[in-house]
Image (cartoon, rainbow, N blue to C red):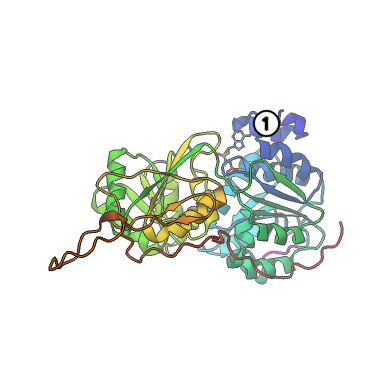
């Protein structure tokens, strides 16, 4: 199959050729004709498999072929993204695909001055990429009208529809014309989100090009059990032993990011961090420098988990496991993209066993364990598997106390210190979904 057989127009074919895209990826092969036919879509495909072009390319064609010119302070298509960095990246891709077309594109997001964005919107833009908060601000300040909108895309749709964004999304929905095309794209969709999404779409086509909720099979995954307090030491040990060159590291908290960056910089390692407390310009600069290999180790919170496309990134390390199992798939999906291979290593301590179990259950795999010599944990990480069971090994029977022995015996690594949460047979691995009324949709 070629892009030409999907019915794309010549300026788009030329742009794709310039970018070196020879054949459509599976998600593109299914999504492009469906979007061109005006269908609503719910599309699930693994990380790094070309979803952006899957929605952006046919959208550009629709906008070129039909519809009136964009009015001042208006947009004809809106792509919503959960993070500023992703909005910037998606816009860069859209602009590349649009290079031979007479269309305008632009990205708006928070953390930077709103005035230049208001100026830019004056003439209207055909495709607007946005994060929800800034979009609402611009709308409220009358810098943007959405009555001309014909297509809405939610990139990383499950994240956009979960609780964190529910209020903003409900507000945006009220601003949009009822008659429109809606496209949802993500690597993961929980059942709850699927149900909610189903209510928002009009006779949607569901595209699923890979088994549900799995990471790209180009990523080799394994875990190293370790005690929590020894994680920084283990990280440095593995980094030196493996001669790591370019690594994206995920930590749970902003403080955790800062602490690891400080430690690494203190050792003379070229490391930087991104998280929500940093100014946007600093965040983007750190990401750009990492993408261009000027920074060797980038430590981030989940702000960097979704969608970011870093060419040939060989390794992702989960310094901490994510609280929400789906985020594991997104995090490790920063490597092994576009058919490349990659590796994902997770440092797991005993109190993360339930998160580990939830990840294994969601991804239907038992992660290989590698015990690193001299880092064997005092607090054992109980065995887990894809069934969601946490297997507690029976403790070794206690020997009767030798009379007069006194003192504590060293029970070694098999002793659980009480840090380990009790095993739960079924751990809900998904985010909570909002209960907001998406309202009945008028038939197109
Ligand atoms: P995405 O999942 O949209 O972030 O895309 C992942 C990576 O694959 C990006 O670097 C794209 O430029 C690249 N890509 C997308 N579609 C194709 C294609 N059909 N052929 C080659 N590379 C592609």
Q: Nearer the viewer, residue 117 or 349?
A: 349
Q: Nearer the viewer, residue 311 or 410?
A: 410
Residue 311 on image: x %, y %: 49, 39
Quadrant position of ligand 1? top right
Residue at 74% across, 30% down: 4
Q: Quadrant of residue 345?
A: top left
Please give left or right for residue 201 compared with residue 271 in the image: right
Identify the residue under disc 1.
14
Residue at 23% across, 63% down: 400
Q: Where, quadrant-wise, is the N terminus in this rendering?
A: top right
Please give left or right for residue 62 compared with residue 241 in the image: right
160 relative to 288, above or below = below
Q: Residue furthest left?
A: 404
Residue at 50% across, 45% down: 334
Q: Find numbered disc 1 in the image and state the secondary structure of the residue it sits on.
A: helix
Residue 403 on image: x %, y %: 15, 67
Residue 319 shows in this picture? yes
Residue 142 shows in this picture? no
């Amino acid at each position: 199959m070629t892009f030409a057989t999907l019915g794309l127009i010549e300026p788009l074919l030329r742009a794709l050729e310039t970018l070196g895209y020879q054949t459509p990826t599976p998600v593109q092969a299914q999504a492009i004709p469906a979007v061109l036919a005006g269908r609503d879509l719910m599309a699930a495909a693994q990380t790094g498999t070309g979803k952006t072009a899957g929605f952006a390319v046919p959208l550009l064609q629709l906008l070129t072929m039909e519809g009136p010119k964009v009015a001042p302070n208006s947009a004809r298509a809106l792509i919503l993204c959960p993070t500023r960095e992703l909005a910037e990246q998606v816009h860069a891709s859209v602009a590349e695909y649009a290079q031979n077309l007479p269309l305008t594109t632009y990205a708006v997001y928070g953390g930077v001055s709103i005035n230049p964005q208001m100026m830019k919107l004056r003439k209207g833009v055909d495709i607007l990429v946005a994060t929800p908060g800034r979009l609402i601000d611009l709308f409220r300040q009358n810098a943007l009208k959405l009555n001309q909108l014909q297509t809405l895309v939610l990139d990383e749709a499950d994240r956009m529809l979960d609780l964190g964004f529910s209020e903003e999304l409900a507000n945006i929905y009220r601003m949009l014309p009822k008659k429109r095309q809606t496209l949802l794209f993500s690597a993961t969709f929980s059942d709850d989100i699927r149900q909610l999404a189903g209510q928002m779409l009009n006779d949607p086509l569901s595209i699923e090009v890979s088994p549900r909720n799995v990471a790209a099979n180009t990523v080799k995954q394994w875990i190293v059990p370790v005690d929590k307090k020894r994680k920084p030491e283990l990280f440095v040990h593995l980094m030196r032993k493996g001669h790591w060159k370019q690594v994206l590291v995920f930590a749970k908290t902003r403080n955790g990011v800062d602490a690891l960056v400080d430690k690494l910089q203190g050792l003379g390692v070229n490391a930087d961090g991104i998280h929500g407390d940093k100014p946007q310009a600093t965040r983007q600069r750190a990401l750009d420098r990492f993408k261009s290999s000027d920074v060797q180790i980038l430590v981030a919170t989940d702000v960097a988990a979704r969608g970011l496309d870093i060419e040939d990134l060989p390794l992702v390390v989960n310094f901490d496991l994510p609280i929400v199992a789906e985020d594991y798939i997104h995090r490790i999906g920063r490597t092994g993209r576009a058919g490349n291979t990659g590796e994902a290593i997770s440092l797991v301590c005993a109190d993360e066993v339930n998160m580990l179990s939830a990840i294994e259950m969601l991804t239907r795999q038992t992660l290989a364990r590698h015990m690193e010599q001299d880092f064997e944990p005092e607090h054992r990480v109980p065995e887990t598997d894809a069934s969601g069971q946490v297997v507690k090994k029976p403790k070794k029977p206690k020997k009767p106390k030798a009379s007069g022995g006194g003192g504590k015996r060293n029970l070694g690594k098999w002793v659980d210190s009480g840090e380990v949460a009790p095993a739960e047979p079924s751990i809900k691995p998904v985010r909570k979904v909002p209960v907001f009324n998406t309202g009945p949709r008028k038939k197109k």
